[in-house]
Image (tube, coloured by chain):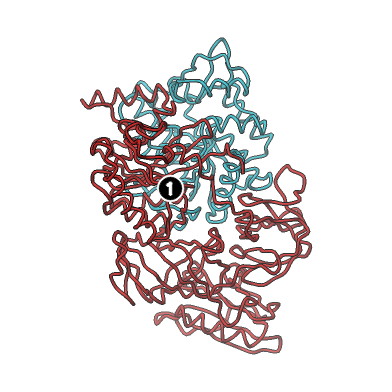
């Protein structure tokens, strides 16, 4: 690891516990505030008839400055003698939790700020919990405003004990708990004489002890396929190495399909073929044999593949305006995989501020709540538990157009078919020909499952049909289940040259479907 | 991983994600250092071939050197170039004397809107950076805009772990920002490392150079003796002058950039 790499830190905590002042102080003490920015803020404050306001460094929107609140997350930069930092400011108001999470999800480490006079408050606990669910493990607690309580050791220790206890209950152990005054600069860059009873590091020293990202190169290889580019007579699988090391010549296996392959080359544009690529690198991969795998599959070294998850138990935070409902369908996104998922259990519904379990076996999870849940997936995807591999053990839930929740995988269960089952996405195989839509599955021997996209179903809704040529009669049952699940009509015919199914949208206004107009296959 | 490599990989990941998710894509190329770096990154992401057109919104007030540079690079890199102009406003004599807000909005924002409507682009790449200016610091990587082009900065969708919001209704387009995490200094260090040819206006001549390129009437060069990329990097490491000091539209009124941007300005 290179110590000069930028560290991204998020500053979280309850409203008015001093985030903006701390950011200003970090700038001031490290000499990072550009003179021009200082003058610009000074002028704005003067025009508004107020004293210099460090909050304006981050609160750039008119609404933020007018009302003295942080609405959305923003980033800025400062430097210590060790390395550059990116500061991510996160709003402290409950209403802007989704913006706090957006900021915190991008961080390598966090400062959790607590007002030493006021103690732990609602958003202190909620933010700490969110850090834990986002997978952030490098946390320093700063107990602020100690100037207001005369730098009394007992006041600090009371707050320290309370916050340590809470963090432990969400699985976090702070690297340090530092007594500070952001306003007066105690224990930020230099040790304060007013806290002679404190022997730990200053806040900046504590930050300098953190790492830019959790070292994931020692974990097994995970290379989710992001896209496939075909050209110059070859298929290049594009993706980013999420963990481990991808080596040319190695024997690899895709999950969940179980397809095996030997890596022929690892490529970047304008560079000679690479012997290997490491976590964080975006590359293109080719294989010694032609194979067909789709986006979402994950390449691993033979023998250490991700399990093919059919059911996922997880801890999740919910940001949706509408509640998360039991038995409802959602789109779950994990690495590059996207899958329809039914929320099959809400084991515990939890108040994200108190950690109190408000309900067991619940029917719904409301906005800002946390829950332990189980999703049953429409088809298998590669997934690891968060503990085993953080990059492959975190996911988001999409509702309509937007991400509305996210969380970390606690447990993965495969279905009885195991990892040999291949998922065939009918929409990506559909060919539109002059006389209709056509999918050829005649080469798909072995266990398969079918999946369609929302666009596919929508096209059928507009009156289109699709003819599917099957490989074996076993596939018929799977197609029938799919048709049932989406309310589609289906006809089946066995002919001299194989089995053929036609899917269409059943609707009372449309005449009974016939197979006329489809090519004879 | 070294910082520039981390930034490069992050941008490539964003490009590939957008390309997979949107059929009708275009990239705004303002001919400046940022969007030219973005174009270079796109070539990396797609192994040399840029699979979408580049759109230049030409206000008719651009420096002639920029246009010459644009046409030369487009040819050399084999990219498809689409030039958009709000011709009607130009014909009717729109210029900054009508007010900078009005002029920027007509020639840039509406020029962009026209070209998006005409080509039905659903996703456009823009080379904005968080360190440029306060309202840009608030942006998402994938930022939805409604049919009136408006940016709802008060209620942006969450975005985490490179899981971007990519499924939008037909009335929405999305601005994709692959350079959001870069700084001005990162850009120049990368231009140096990759030897990316940039517009000659950035290099000092007669004691002045442009640090940010715009339209001739509203874009002023700053005092500088930096004649090479190395010298520019050295200058940026010590300068106290903000990047957009030479851009008049930023300074005309409080929150002008926020207001322009909420209406769809880049």
- The quadrant in which the C terminus of chain B is found is top left
User: Can the viewer see residue B110?
Assistant: no
Task: Tell me where residue A409 appears, x and y as whole percent.
Answer: 48, 66
Q: Quadrant of residue A443?
A: bottom right
Describe residue B142's horizontal placement relative to residue A142 as left or right: right
Q: Position of residue A89 (x, y in %)?
A: 38, 42
Camera-side residue of B143 and A73: A73
Q: In the picture provided, is A207 more to the left or to the right than A297?
A: left
The x and y percentages for residue B106 are 39, 33
Q: Is residue B171 left or right of residue A82?
A: left
Quarter-of-image position of residue B235: top right
Q: Is residue B252 visible?
A: yes
- Residue located at (45% from left, 66% from top): A331
Question: Looking at the colours in the rendered structure, which chain would you say is drawn in cyan?
Answer: B
**Image mark 1: chain:** B
Mark 1 closeness class: few <14, some 14–19, many ≥20 residues within 10 Å: many
Number of numbered discs overlaid on the protein picture: 1
Counting from the top left corner in percent of width and height, residue A224 is at 61, 60
Residue indicated by mark 1:
B143
Which residue occupies 61% across, 17% down? Answer: B227
Viewer-side residue, A252 vs A111: A111
* SS at mark 1 in the image: strand
Give the chain coloured red.
A
């Amino acid at each position: 690891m290179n110590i000069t790499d930028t560290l991204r830190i998020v500053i979280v905590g309850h409203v008015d516990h001093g985030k903006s002042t701390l950011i200003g102080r970090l700038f001031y003490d490290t000499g990072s505030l550009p003179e021009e920015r200082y003058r610009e803020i000074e002028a704005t404050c003067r025009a508004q008839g107020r004293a210099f306001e460090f909050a304006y460094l981050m609160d750039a929107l008119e609404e933020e400055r007018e009302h003295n609140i942080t609405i959305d997350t923003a980033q800025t930069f400062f430097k210590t003698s060790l390395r550059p930092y990116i500061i991510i400011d996160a709003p402290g108001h409950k209403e802007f939790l989704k913006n706090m999470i957006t900021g915190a999800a991008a961080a390598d480490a966090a400062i959790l700020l607590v007002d030493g006079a006021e103690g732990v408050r609602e958003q202190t606990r909620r933010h700490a919990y969110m850090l834990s669910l986002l997978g952030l493990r490098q946390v320093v607690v700063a107990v602020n405003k100690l100037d207001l309580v005369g730098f009394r050791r007992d006041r600090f220790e009371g707050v320290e004990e309370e916050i340590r206890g809470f963090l432990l209950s969400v699985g976090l152990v702070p690297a340090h708990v530092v007594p500070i005054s952001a306003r007066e600069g105690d224990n930020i860059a230099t040790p304060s004489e007013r806290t002679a009873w404190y022997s730990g590091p200053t806040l900046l020293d504590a930050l300098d002890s953190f790492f830019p990202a959790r070292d994931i190169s020692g974990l097994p290889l995970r290379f989710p396929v992001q896209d496939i580019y075909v050209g110059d007579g070859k298929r290049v699988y594009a993706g980013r190495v999420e963990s481990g090391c991808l080596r040319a010549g190695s024997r690899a296996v895709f999950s969940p399909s179980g397809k095996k392959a030997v890596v022929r080359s690892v490529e970047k544009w304008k560079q000679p073929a690479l012997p290997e690529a490491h976590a964080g690198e975006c590359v293109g991969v080719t294989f010694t044999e032609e194979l067909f795998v789709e986006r979402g599959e994950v390449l691993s070294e033979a023998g250490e593949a991700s399990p093919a998850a059919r059911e996922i138990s997880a801890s999740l935070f919910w940001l949706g305006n509408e509640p998360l409902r039991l038995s409802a369908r959602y789109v779950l996104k994990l690495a590059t995989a996207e899958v329809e998922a039914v929320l099959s259990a809400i084991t515990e519904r939890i108040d994200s501020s108190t950690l109190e379990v408000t309900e067991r076996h619940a029917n719904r999870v409301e906005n800002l709540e946390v829950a332990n849940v189980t999703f049953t997936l429409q088809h298998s995807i590669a997934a690891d538990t968060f503990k085993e591999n953080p990059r492959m053990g975190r996911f988001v839930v999409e509702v309509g157009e937007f991400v509305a929740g996210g969380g970390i995988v606690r447990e993965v269960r495969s279905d009885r078919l195991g990892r040999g089952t291949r998922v065939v996405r009918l929409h990506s195989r559909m060919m539109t020909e002059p006389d209709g839509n056509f999918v050829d599955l005649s080469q798909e021997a072995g266990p398969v499952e079918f999946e369609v996209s929302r666009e596919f179903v929508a096209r059928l809704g507009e009156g289109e049909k699709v003819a599917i040529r099957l490989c074996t009669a076993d596939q018929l049952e799977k197609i029938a289940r799919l048709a049932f699940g989406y309310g589609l009509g289906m006809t089946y015919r066995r002919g001299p040259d194989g089995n053929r199914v036609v899917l269409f949208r059943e609707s009372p206004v449309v005449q009974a479907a016939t197979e006329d107009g489809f090519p004879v296959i | 991983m070294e910082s520039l490599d981390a930034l490069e990989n992050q941008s490539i990941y964003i490009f590939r994600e957008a390309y997979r998710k949107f059929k009708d894509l275009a990239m705004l190329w303002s001919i400046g250092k940022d969007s030219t770096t973005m174009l270079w990154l796109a070539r990396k992401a797609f192994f040399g071939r840029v699979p979408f057109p580049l759109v230049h919104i030409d206000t008719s007030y651009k420096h002639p050197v920029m246009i010459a540079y644009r046409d030369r690079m487009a040819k050399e890199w084999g990219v498809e170039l689409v030039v958009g102009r709000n011709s009607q406003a130009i014909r009717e004599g729109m210029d900054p004397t009508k007010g900078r807000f009005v002029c920027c909005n007509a020639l840039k924002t509406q020029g962009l809107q026209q070209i998006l409507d005409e080509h039905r682009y659903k996703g456009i790449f823009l080379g904005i950076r968080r360190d440029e200016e306060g309202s840009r610091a608030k942006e998402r990587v994938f930022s939805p805009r409604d049919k009136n082009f408006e940016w709802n900065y008060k209620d942006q969708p969450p975005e985490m772990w490179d899981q971007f919001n990519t499924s939008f209704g037909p009335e929405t387009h999305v601005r994709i920002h692959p350079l959001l995490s870069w700084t001005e200094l990162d850009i120049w260090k990368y231009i140096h490392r990759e030897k990316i040819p940039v517009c000659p206006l950035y290099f000092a001549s007669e004691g002045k150079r442009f640090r940010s390129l715009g339209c001739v009437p509203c874009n002023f060069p700053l005092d500088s003796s930096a004649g090479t990329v190395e010298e520019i990097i050295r200058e940026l490491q010590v300068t106290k002058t903000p990047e957009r000091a030479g851009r008049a539209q930023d300074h005309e009124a409080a929150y002008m950039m926020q207001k322009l941007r909420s209406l769809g300005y880049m």
